[in-house]
Image: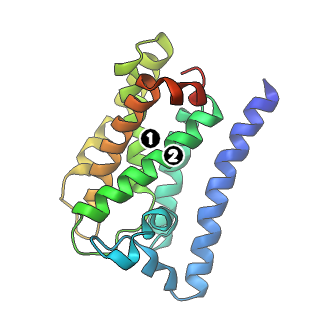
Amino acid sequence: MTSSLWLRVRVITCVVMLISIIHIFNIILDGQFNQYGIIPRSPENWYHIITAPFIHGSYWHLINNIIGLSIFSAICLVRPVSFYLISSLIIILVTGILVWLFGREASHIGASGWIFGLWSLSITIAWFDRSFKNIAIALFVIFFYGGMIYGILPIQTGVSFESHLFGVVAGVVCGAIATKTTLLRRSYGRL
């Protein structure tokens, strides 16, 4: 039990450290990593779908996303680590592809799509797999973080609401895949 808990703590710590180190290098290089954000419908920048969640424009942006990512990663890690890793990969890819296809002309950076994906995943898993644990997690997330739904509205300039919106979509897709696909369900472990 203790080794399992430490594994989860190490996973979150590694994610936070990776994002923080990338941000430090980005500052040292005077924001040169910002060019690796998602530029919608730009064929030469398609691979930025993978790089964009790890790049942040300011300390405030970084801190907000680290806090949110840590909270929702911890909630997701109530389940097996493999569930978190596979879910994160699916959420990052689906969110990035949708932003690349349908986002506004801008450079979309930051982990907020990933965060919104983990948020919606925590809720939608209860819809697809109605165990006591999943329902309790969903109610906790709705009660304490239900206000995040306003993040999908285009009300704040300079914020990629598309990443938030498509992150929510990606979390729902991920929840469906996790509970309905037998092959992946084995990889996910017990939900």
33 left or right of 162 in image: right
Estimate the x, y position of residue 26 in percent, counting from the top left: 56, 80
5 left or right of 148 in image: right
Mark 1, residue position: 118
Quadrant housing residue 18: bottom right
Instruction: Please name the amino acid that badge 1 sits on.
Output: Leu
Out of 69 and 45, give the one closest to the viewer: 45
Note whether 96 is above or below 182 in the view shown: below
Disc number at residue 88?
2
96 left or right of 53 in image: left
Please report whichever mark, 2 or 1, sits nearer to the chain's N-terminal start.
2
Residue 145 visible (yes or no):
no
Out of 144 and 15, give the one closest to the viewer: 15
Q: Secondary structure at mark 1?
A: helix
Disc number at residue 23?
none
Circles 2 and 1 in contact, beta carbons < 8 Å: yes
Residue found farthest to the bottom: 30
Q: Secondary structure at mark 2?
A: helix
Instruction: Please name the amino acid that badge 2 sits on.
Output: Ser
Query: What residue is at 37 percent from the left and 70 percent from the top?
Result: 38
Estimate the x, y position of residue 81 in percent, counting from the top left: 64, 35
Residue 82 visible (yes or no):
yes
Note whether 166 is above or below 26 in the view shown: above
Query: What residue is at 60 percent from the left and 24 percent from the top?
Result: 189
Note whether 170 is above or below 155 in the view shown: above
Report the number of discs.
Answer: 2
Residue found farthest to the right: 3
Quadrant housing residue 148: top left
